[in-house]
Image (cartoon, rainbow, N blue to C red):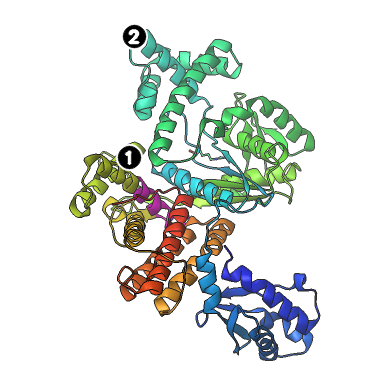
Amino acid sequence: MISPFSAVRPLAQKAISGILGLPAADIDPVVRESQFADLQLNAALALSRRHGMTPMELAQLIADALGGEPLIAEATASKPGYVNIVLADSWIEQQIRDLSIPTRLDPSGRRVVVDYSSPNVAKEMHVGHLRTTVVGDALVRILDWLGNDVIKQNHIGDWGTPFGMLIEHALDAKSSGQDAHELAEDPNAFYQAAREKFDADEDFATRARLRVVLLQAGDEATLSLWSDLVGESKTYFNKVYAALEVSLRDEDLAGESTYNAQLPLLCEDLEKIGLATVSEGALCAFPEGFKGRDNQPAALILRKSDGGYGYATTDVAALKYRVQELKADSVVYVVGSPQANHLEMVWQLTREAGWLTPATDVTHVKIGNVLGPDNKILRTRSGKSFKLLDLVDEAVARAHKVLVESSSLESPEEMQAVARMIGTGAVKYADLSVAHDTEYIFDLDRMVSLSGNTAPYLQYAVARIRSLIERGERTSQVTNTVVISLPEERQLAMSLLNFEAAVETAGEKLEPHRLCAYLFALTQRFSSFYDAAPVLNAEDDARSSRLALCRATEQVLVQGLSLLGIRAPQRM
Ligand code: ARG
């Protein structure tokens, strides 16, 4: 598949190089979408003065040179120095005829580490984690499709002082014959019960503190108990990932504890380089450019006075590992916005230590809050945070209701399966279709609605197109002619050819909502096309041609949705 951008770019480079006598490869013709044509070139604006011309003079020369290209129907200079380009219908027709969406673009050789999801052991995943999980997974799929070598890192919180009380609580539960699997079923209840005992029972608190010491000292029996707890949590995470149809697997886990063995030496190194000093018993670093209270340099605590290492220390070790061992060209953190300062301090310290160099770029994909109808962070009536699995189940139930009202599906099993596809798709799409750093209101009824910028709207379009294609191909011979006659056909075709460019933009900017916006606009164009151009009742060539547009639309929508981690039903 060749996008209009990549088809026009080399022609424009050749034209400009002929006029200015520069090597074609050095020229960026600045090809952009245009309001007045299919595309526009902006290069004349920047290049003309250096070559003693006005932008309009250069734009006119470029337009003249491009006029002879068979791919271009019309090239005109437009004030103050743009070149507007209309593509030849014949080229568009041929592209649609030959359209095939690759399963993946050629490998780019770029290695991208994506840190996402990253929930905490022995705690419920909340809607904040829903977003880091869903956005991260879409980015992984998009970046992978673009040919990057993607490494997923699920930086789960699996270490720290709370494990003392959690282990003791698990031991108590076991010795009194209680269900040891509560953690996998209802992590919050488990955590809270441990917390309550810790606050109320002095004996228990002492045992818990001793347990932390044993854990940090690497006592084998304690480690084994700890690892059981982590195992229970993994079972729970995997249940959530399965329900959300997210691609994370056990092999993507690289929790905080992964870096334990490196921390003492890492701290020693930082001290030696002069980047860390002991202050009030704790080892601290003061990365440049960060101010805390009273305008004093802000501290990252590397080792607490009790000897335990902090969240930041682990993050420094993780980044060092990602650069030096995983050989990342780029590290992407899909993490809540409130952690921006933490991450920037960690990066700055890692830079100062010489472990992070300009060869690796680091980006924080900031995740905004999910709000309830009252515009506050989403909680249940009793003030607790919602359980993710309950939210997904509720979405599926509402999708089922919508189907009961609107669908012609007869088998209850199929209806249930489609409801699941729509319900999970709806929740994920609602997350993906807004800019990741904005807040949005969690509104299940809007999410599962068949109209508007929702997953079910797109899924429904796919199902309708599929049925159209099936009927079209069943009822008469289809040739592989594509003829563009109506403006709606041309608009749909152009939109289809821009798929790759849309995925590229989403990948470059790390913004899945751009792909959503593209798919939504495409679907709207399909609707306009369908309103203007009868498909099944059209005559021979027009019928075949319109069916080809349907097939191309189906391909693009299905591939686009799959890059968002959303499936499309056969019927609905
Ligand atoms: N576990 C953390 C949380 O729930 C998120 C971890 C993000 N990744 C990182 N490398 N710090 O807030």
Q: Is residue 393 left or right of residue 513?
A: left
Q: Quadrant of residue 324?
A: top right
Query: As rendered, which of 355 and 395 lies closer to the eye?
Result: 395
Q: Residues within 10 Å of mark 1 (few under 14, many from 20)?
A: some
Q: Is residue 301 above or below residue 476?
A: above
Q: Is residue 489 above or below residue 126?
A: below
Quadrant housing the N terminus = bottom right
- The residue at 44%/17% (across/down) is 205
**Label 2 residue SS:** loop
Residue 424 rendering spot, x and y as whole percentages: 35, 45
State the mark number for residue 56.
none
Of all residues, the one furthest to the front in this rendering is 477
Secondary structure beneath disc 1?
A: loop
- Mark number for residue 176? 2
Look at the image and give the residue range highlighted in magenta.
Answer: 424-439
Q: Is residue 434 magenta?
A: yes
Residue furthest top as drawn: 175
Q: Which residue is mark 1?
A: 386
Q: Amino acid at mark 1?
A: Phe
Residue closest to the far left: 405
Residue occupying image coordinates x 52% and y 73%: 92
Q: Residue at x 61, y 84 (%)?
A: 82
Magenta span has 49? no
